[in-house]
Image (tube, grey):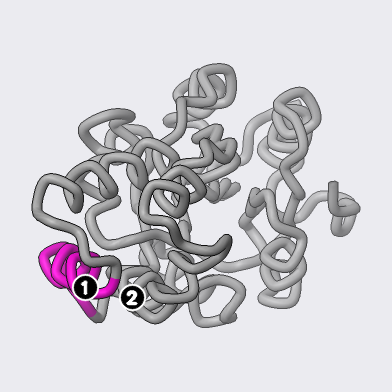
Amino acid sequence: MSVTAAACVIFDIGGVLELTPETGWVQQWEARLELPSGAVHERMRDVWQAGSLGTIGERDVHEQLAARLRLDAPQVDAFMAGLWREYLGTPNEELIAYLRGLRGKCRLGILSNSFVGARERESELYHFDELVEQIVYSHELGIEKPDPRAFEAVCTALGVEPETCLFIDDFAVNVEAAEAAGMRAHLFEDNARTIARIAAHVGAGPRGAGRAPTG
């Protein structure tokens, strides 16, 4: 089956291109600070949200950590190191290798709910910016999935129509939102099914035999 150049594949990062199991770093800090379970996220909830939308910078995050959790500067650095270790996870080597092989065969993009500082760290570690044409981060856009404007933004950035796109995410709510925005979408559960779904989309092109089922 011939490749259709107009086909587009858009990836999520965390849980898809990065494998990000929980490391327990928050629970370790709660034990260390003698705080009840859930206290860290409760105290920092609005800061995490602001960092996801880019309304505060990394320095602000550090200052709020120091004030709200009563951490000194070395403790703030250690806390953030744990946060980024879990956030960045490890590369999904098989899927990244497959993505690399798609270059020149279809349009490629990333749409990620993110945190301030993510672009610099992910570019340094994983070079996603070299693998796709556009990366749309929530902390730079000011909008998070599943807001339909996030899907509109990545299509605009790539200069493509939604119906040409296959969006891949590990959260069902985001997959459903992508479909509502006019995209085809796939719920990431494992590499084998995801790669097969991408291959079918790229081979069939934007006007294949109807919308494929999610998953």
Residues at marks 1 and 2 touching, judged by CB atoms closer than 8 Å: yes
Q: Residue furthest front?
A: 34
Q: Residue at x 11, y 65 (%)?
A: 59
Residues at marks 1 and 2, CA–CA distance in whole angstroms:
8 Å
Q: Is residue 75 above or below residue 172?
A: above
Q: Residue at x 51, y 18 (%)?
A: 93
Secondary structure type for disc 2 = helix
Q: Residue at x 41, y 64 (%)?
A: 159
Res 47 label: 2
**Residue 204 shown in magenta:** no
**How many numbered discs?**
2
Query: Which SS does the magenta portion mostly show?
Result: helix
**Residue 64 shown in magenta:** yes
Range of the magenta residues? Answer: 56-68
Q: Nearer the viewer, residue 22 or 66?
A: 66
* Residue 65 falls in image quadrant: bottom left
Q: Amino acid at mark 1?
A: Gln
